[in-house]
Image (cartoon, rainbow, N blue to C red):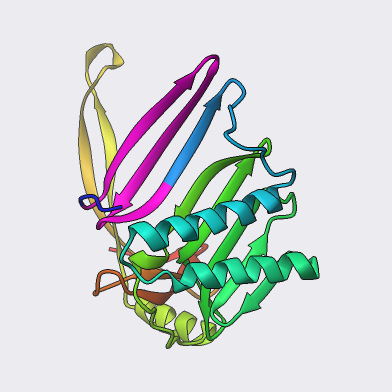
Amino acid sequence: MLAPHSEGDSYILNMSSSTVVVTFMFDNGLFNYCIIDYKGDPLYVQQPQVTELDCAKSFMTHYQSYMSKNSDIDISYLQSANSIINKASEAKVSKLTNDNIKFEVSEDGNNFKWTYTQNNIDFSRKRIELDFRLGRLHSVYDGWSLYSDPKTSSISKDQAVNLALSAAENYTLNFTQRTPIYGSGNNVIGYNETKLTVKPDLTNVTTQTWFGTEMRDKPGTLYPLWTIKFTFEKQSTIF
């Protein structure tokens, strides 16, 4: 299972009129994701499962077994992932949180996702995801082992907006206004450039916020992140 940092490759499997193309990626020697494309009807070595849920359960069981024999990383997260999908299946629910794992099934039943969660913060990069198309496994993503235990201390939305507003009030925008210079035949022969510095008027600003998690100063460690977008209606000063 080991490969150089961000190393990928593809395999083409042919038999009779069936072709399967598997493209995969490793990151820091760890499996990250793969995409499976089918041309023609696939040939199965054993009878496939009837539903996508059963296919997902079967894949996760085989994935855990393979990783336990061929990888030296801690695979307890796969044991927990298998346990939670079985519990969700028995309870016939599409969402279930157990310990630090949130399990979700899409409305169409084609996507299965296990996300690391802590203190009501979902760390979307630290997840396992299976996606099915036309009843066949199309992609597998496993970013669980790529990230260490995330940092969960976070400021509130209001605090984030106030901090962003404070920074925006002291911010200026720099623009270059270009006016064309015309020569004979009304052809543009050059431009006059005027440098403009604009200070936004944030009195009636429109605010949009997004919350997510990203890496910051320490590779492999995820941090909560507020993204604040201000849209202002007019500028108060041009100089």
Q: Is residue 199 visible?
A: no
Dominant secondary structure of the residues highlighted in magenta in the image? strand
Task: Identify the residue at horizontal 58%, vertical 66% (top origin).
Answer: 82
Q: Is residue 78 above or below residue 108?
A: below
Q: Picture coordinates of residue 140 (x, y %)? A: 49, 49
User: Residue 124, percent across and down?
Assistant: 49, 66
Which residue range is magenta in the image? 5-33
Q: Closest to the observer: 59 or 9?
A: 59
Residue at the (65%, 65%) spot, across then down: 85
Whether the magenta-drawn stretch holds residue 213 is answered as no
Quadrant, the C terminus: bottom left
Q: Is residue 114 above or below residue 1?
A: below
Residue lying farthest to the right in this orientation? 92
Examine the rendering and report whether any part of residue 134 can be seen.
yes
Q: Residue at x 30, y 66 (%)?
A: 72
Q: Is residue 184 left or right of residue 101?
A: left
Q: Residue at x 22, y 19 (%)?
A: 183
Residue sitting at the far top: 185
Residue 89 percent across, percent down from the top left: 74, 64
Magenta-drawn stretch contains 21: yes
Relative to 15, is 181 on the left or the right?
Answer: left
- Of 189 and 232, the residue lying toward us: 232
Residue 176 drawn at (x, y percent): 26, 48
Is 117 drawn above or below residue 5 in the view shown? below
